[in-house]
Amino acid sequence: MALRKKGIFFTLISLFIVAILVLVASSQSTVTLKDEVPITQTAVSIGNNYIKNLDEVYLSRTLKVVSYRALRTLIWYMNSTPPQGFLKDKGDFDKKFAELVVNGTIDGAPVVVNGQNFMLNYNLTKRLADIENISMRVYNLNTTFNKDYSSINYSVIAFQSADTRSLQVAVNVTLNYTVNATLAYWQRVVVIQAQTPIYQLDDPLYALNWTTKLPLPASPMAFTNKILMTSTSIFNVTTLWQFINSSQYRYSARAPSFLSRFYNDYTASQCCGMESAVNPALINNNLYDEGRPWPEKKSYIDWCYFGPQPRCKLGSRLWNITGVSNYTPGGYNNAFILDTDSAILYNVSDWINTTYCEPDKTCYP
Amino acid sequence: MGKRGYFFTIDAFIAMLITTIGVVLVYLAYTSVPDVYQQQAISQDVMTIFSTTELNTLNSEYIDEQRISGNITNMQNTIFEQIAEMYDKGIVGEAQNMTREMSASLIPSQYYYEIWLDSKLMYNKSYVTNDIEQISVAKVILVGSVSLATLWGPYEGEVFVWR
């Protein structure tokens, strides 16, 4: 009997020891909690990478293309039928440009030219909605952009500076958005920057100043000049001739910038001015207003030619350029004229001639 | 004496039984998690290479041929951006060829993989099975431009890896 009792006792001790072992080992289940930490780390890491790419890649690329389209649309709008004309001032430009970038409209209406809405699907409202949709699908991140155009946290600014020079327009957009990953939450106010080239955009100065008596062709922009910078750095009679006939542009600190041409402002831009030579071959009898005197007694540098007279330096004389100007109506460089300062700048002051000559060879100083 | 040995033997068997049950209970307390570490690392690795490596940093005859033929016009595109650009232009065959060329040497032969763009299969090295386990996926959003006035995307890029 004593032996049986001992056996039961020893068995109970064994069971007790095993139970303790199980309990001690089971407490290792806290190790599985450690396995959850990498998942949280991964979610935060994915969110951080997504936000970095969003700010530096997706949004800046989108803004660059949308801005280019907005500039092009704004020129079309100004030159549409009936013509809207030059914008009133910088403030008017900022307002209309910002609305185009954000909503693709001007004064609430889409800009349709020849049946084409160039801003369709190319405005920030649409593009940000696309990013919101795809971020949820790809990363399971709930992205929400503040699309309140009137909000102070959603501003669009276009400008030119020493960084952009003549050839680019910088656009800054302040965006307010949140990203919700359930495990983590981001609230961001960022300034997205893009530098948009103005290559092949129409020059507003030309587009709004050409006059014609003939019915317009299908495109109202047929008689315009597209921005293309010259590669010529050294000017003489030969390269001036090429510069005129290529209708290209060069940097000039005495000339207005591309943006100021939208509101007919001829203030010289030290950092970003550009000028071209108006090609007299384009001003032929088909384009010319019969009421205007011919030949025109003004310098053919674009801001001198189109701007309010007297342009360029007051009191400057006007010259034909031997080897450049000819006297055949409708011919190349017919009656091409430069002012004194421009003749010096383009290194043709040794080739200046009396101002212009009538077909009967009567010449005027 | 015999009876004592009998009891000791029984005692030992019972002890072994209790110990075994205890050990089994201890092991059952752990949750078995399949190891997908390798697949995760490979899919992430491929996605990082595709998303960050610019074409102008690669020494590839295939890329040179595509540049000469005009299918590649921007050597600053990353691999995945170039594939997406080809897809957006409608030359899907070339996009698939490029996916194959760029991915072939990146993934060890014992793994199977698929690369998708905008829910379209670009390339796969796989066999169909109903019980694929331990599959890992890496994803990315792609946006780019082919000209000053034209954007493509956003597209979803995916890399699936399993064994």
Image (cartoon, grey):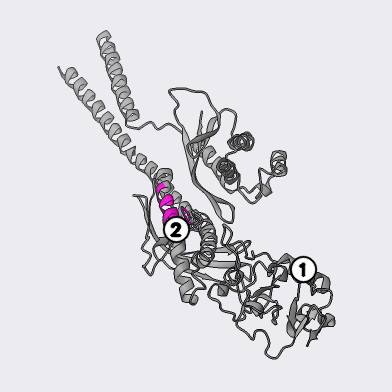
Q: Residue at x 43, y 44 (%)?
A: A138
Label 1: state its secondary structure: loop
Residue A21 in sight from this viewpoint: yes
Compared with A253, B120 (above or below) is: above
Q: Amino acid at mark 2?
A: Leu
Left or right: where does residue A205 sit relative to residue A93?
right
Is the N terminus of chain A in the top left, top right, bottom left or bottom right quadrant? Answer: top left
Q: Nearer the viewer, mark 2 or mark 1?
A: 1
Residue at the far top in the pictured view: B2
Look at the magenta stretch and give its main secondary structure: helix
**Residue B62 on image: x %, y %:** 70, 38
| Total numbered labels | 2
Asked if the magenta segment contains residue A131, the reply would be yes
Q: As rendered, which of A356 and B96 lies closer to the eye?
A: A356
Q: As rendered, which of A269 and A188 lies closer to the eye?
A: A269
Residue at the far left in the pictured view: A1
Left or right: where does residue A125 sit relative to residue A290?
left
Is the C terminus of chain A in the top left, top right, bottom left or bottom right quadrant? Answer: bottom right
Q: As rendered, which of B53 and A112 lies closer to the eye?
A: A112
Query: Do the numbered discs 2 and 1 sit on residues whose CB atoms are within 8 Å?
Result: no
Q: As rendered, which of A30 and A70 lies closer to the eye?
A: A70
**Residue A311 on image: x %, y %:** 65, 84
Q: Which residue is mark 2?
A: A124
Label 2: state its secondary structure: helix
Compared with A104, B103 (above or below) is: above
Of the image marks 2 and 1, the number of the one nearer the N terminus:
2
Q: Which disc number belongs to residue A332?
A: 1
Q: Mark 2 belongs to which subunit? A: A
Q: Which disc number belongs to residue B138?
A: none
Residue segment shown in magenta: A119-133
Q: Residue at x 27, y 33 (%)?
A: A20
Asked if the magenta segment contains residue A204, the reply would be no
